[in-house]
């Protein structure tokens, strides 16, 4: 019987949650056609919520988080993949209520997996991970809405986070002028190294937040935090522009009037990477491996081991992580 290491989150009698690296067996994994030996995963905010028992993410314990995984196929019962194929898994139920990438093996439905594109290594695919995939979907949303680089500057909120930092880098790679908004002004050089032409603070973005409309400043925006930051981005977007929305760490509430929508024709584009259909999923991975491939991936990344990930979970919940955290298994 094959045993392997995994981070296991357990619910205690007092309803608290503990986590530890422990030995598991393949028999502990759920049913599924595809068995994968995981080489890399990455840490996302949703993983931290799962690891602390947030019922909106994970309800079944004991549980192994990890909404991202990249590795090599061990076996596939439905012939969609062959032994030895390199694959990427992001989204669906992985790491939520299905044992995830914080273990050395996963077993999943084969339709959740994507064949790794030629232009990416397994490691690079997990530096991107769900955060980078979400960033890519956000940029793609602006592109498909007609927000081209010549239209003006693009605002990115939560710019030092996993989604925000990759969004800044992809936008810069695609030729956009990026204004990065962050609560961590000390990371200004990090953001400019990714391609931001200007860095503003949260307080600067929130100036005049009581107003229903603001001066037209941005051709579009990628918001990763929600709440009043998303509202300000909408108010400051120019006529015909678009704002993408993918996060709620600031708030799930949106207090904004209809004026930007009915007077400026601003569009609010919702971004979901979990249930993203396979055709756009494949299209985006191909772009991330080619024309949008980032040369700065190493600069974005801190690599950790399975034994270190619990400490990083605490840090991401406290807002102390910048860029991407790569887990090598």
Image (cartoon, grey):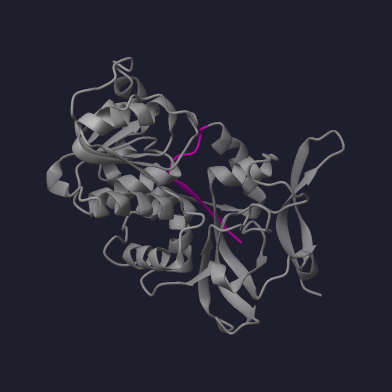
The picture places residue 58, in percent across and down from the top left corner, at 68, 47
Residue at 43 percent across and 62 percent down: it is 124
The picture places residue 197, in percent across and down from the top left corner, at 21, 38
Residue at 79 percent across and 64 percent down: it is 28
From the viewer's perspective, is 164 left or right of 252? left
Q: Residue furthest left?
A: 150
On whether residue 216 falls in the magenta region, the answer is no
The quarter in which the N terminus is drawn is: bottom right
Q: Which residues are magenta?
A: 319-329
Residue at 46 percent across and 58 percent down: it is 276
From the viewer's perspective, is 55 left or right of 293? right
Residue 280 vertical position relative to residue 307 in the rendered view, above or below: below
The picture places residue 287, in percent across and down from the top left corner, at 32, 64
Name the residue nearer the viewer: 120 or 100.
100
Residue 1 vertical position relative to residue 276 in the rendered view, above or below: below
Residue at 72 percent across and 61 percent down: it is 5
Name the residue nearer the viewer: 48 or 255.
255
The picture places residue 126, in percent across and down from the top left corner, at 48, 59
């Amino acid at each position: 019987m094959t045993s392997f290491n995994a981070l296991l989150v357990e619910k205690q009698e007092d309803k608290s949650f503990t986590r530890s690296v422990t030995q598991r067996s393949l028999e502990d994994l759920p049913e599924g056609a595809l068995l994968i030996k995981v080489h890399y995963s990455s840490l996302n905010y949703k993983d931290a919520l799962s690891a602390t028992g947030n019922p909106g993410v994970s309800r079944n314990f004991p549980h192994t988080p990890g909404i991202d995984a990249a590795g090599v196929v061990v076996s596939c019962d439905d012939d969609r993949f062959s032994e030895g194929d390199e694959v990427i898994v992001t989204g669906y139920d992985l790491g939520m209520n299905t044992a995830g990438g914080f273990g050395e093996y996963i077993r999943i439905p084969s339709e959740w997996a994507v064949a790794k594109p030629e232009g990416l290594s397994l490691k690079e695919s997990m530096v991107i991970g769900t955060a980078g995939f979400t960033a890519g979907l956000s940029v793609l949303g602006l592109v498909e809405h007609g927000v081209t680089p010549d239209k003006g500057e693009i605002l990115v909120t939560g710019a030092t986070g996993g989604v925000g930092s990759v969004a800044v880098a992809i936008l810069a790679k695609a030729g956009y002028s990026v204004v990065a908004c962050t609560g961590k002004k000390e990371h200004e050089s990090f953001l400019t190294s990714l391609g931001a032409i200007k860095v503003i603070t949260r307080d600067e973005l929130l100036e005049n937040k009581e107003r229903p409309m603001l001066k037209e400043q941005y051709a579009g925006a990628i918001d990763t935090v929600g709440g009043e930051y998303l509202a300000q981005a909408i108010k400051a977007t120019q006529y015909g522009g678009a704002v993408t929305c993918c996060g709620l760490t600031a708030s799930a509430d949106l207090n904004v009037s209809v004026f930007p929508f009915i007077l400026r024709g601003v569009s609010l584009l919702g971004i979901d990477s979990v249930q993203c259909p396979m055709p756009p999923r494949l299209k985006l991975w191909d772009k991330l491996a080619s024309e949008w491939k980032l040369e700065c991936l190493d600069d974005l990344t801190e690599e950790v081991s399975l034994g270190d990930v619990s400490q990083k979970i605490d840090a991401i919940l406290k807002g102390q992580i910048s860029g991407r955290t790569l887990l090598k298994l």
